[in-house]
Image (spheres, rainbow, N blue to C red):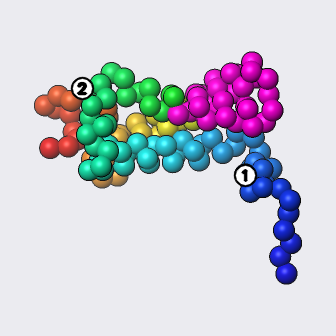
Amino acid sequence: MCEHSDVDPITQFQQLVGERAAYPLVAALLTFALQIAKKSPYTKTLYEKTPVGWRWLTPVIAGGAMGFVHGYQAGHTVTGALLETVFGIFGVSFTAMGLAAGLKESPIPWSGGAGGVKTEDSPGDP
């Protein structure tokens, strides 16, 4: 017979993996979601409308928002929540950008080129 706990599943997950230990998982999911947004017929036009020089802001904003929400949920003051925003930017955003760069440079067949300016020599979409 299963025992039910009064603790919500998010709190149980945080207790299981510790604070900020879920950031790499979220970074991997963010990388996956951005690659889908780049290729999906539903979101491709929105992604293409984002200027190339500003595409790096998408994971930074998502990581900062996650960090702020984490700080708020943990009961920090506004200053503490803003500090958690910085931790989210470093822990989620930069990890997601690194994963995307690793996928681009890996020997695994991958057609999701970088968001940078494409030249005739650069691999990627035809």
Q: Which residues are magenta?
A: 62-91
Q: Would you identify the image quadrant in which residue 81 lies?
A: top right
Q: Disc number at residue 117?
A: 2
> In the rendered view, does 126 fall on the left or right side of 41?
left
Q: What amino acid type should be assigned to the residue bearing mark 2?
A: Val
Q: Nearer the viewer, residue 52 or 109?
A: 52
User: What kind of element bears circle 2?
Assistant: loop
Q: How far is the residue under mark 2 from the one under mark 1?
A: 40 Å
Quarter of the picture holding the C terminus = top left
Within 10 Å of disc 2 (Cα), the crowding (few <14, some 14-19, many 20+) is few
> In the rendered view, does 87 fall on the left or right side of 107?
right
> Residue 49: x and y, percent?
27, 31
Name the residue rendered at 44%, 31% in the picture. 58
Q: What amino acid type should be assigned to the residue bearing mark 1?
A: Ile
* Marks 2 and 1 close (CB-CB < 8 Å): no
Name the residue rendered at 85%, 81% in the picture. 1
User: What kind of element bears circle 1?
Assistant: helix
Name the residue rendered at 53%, 34% in the picture. 62
Within 10 Å of disc 1 (Cα), the crowding (few <14, some 14-19, many 20+) is few
> In the rendered view, does 15 fall on the left or right side of 81?
right
Q: Reply above or below: 123 against 52.
A: below
Q: Reply above or below: 16 against 100.
A: below
**Residue wearing tag 1:** 10
Q: Nearer the viewer, residue 126 or 55?
A: 55
Magenta highlight on residue 89: yes
> Residue 71: x and y, percent?
73, 31
Name the residue rendered at 59%, 31% in the picture. 65
Q: Residue furthest bottom?
A: 1
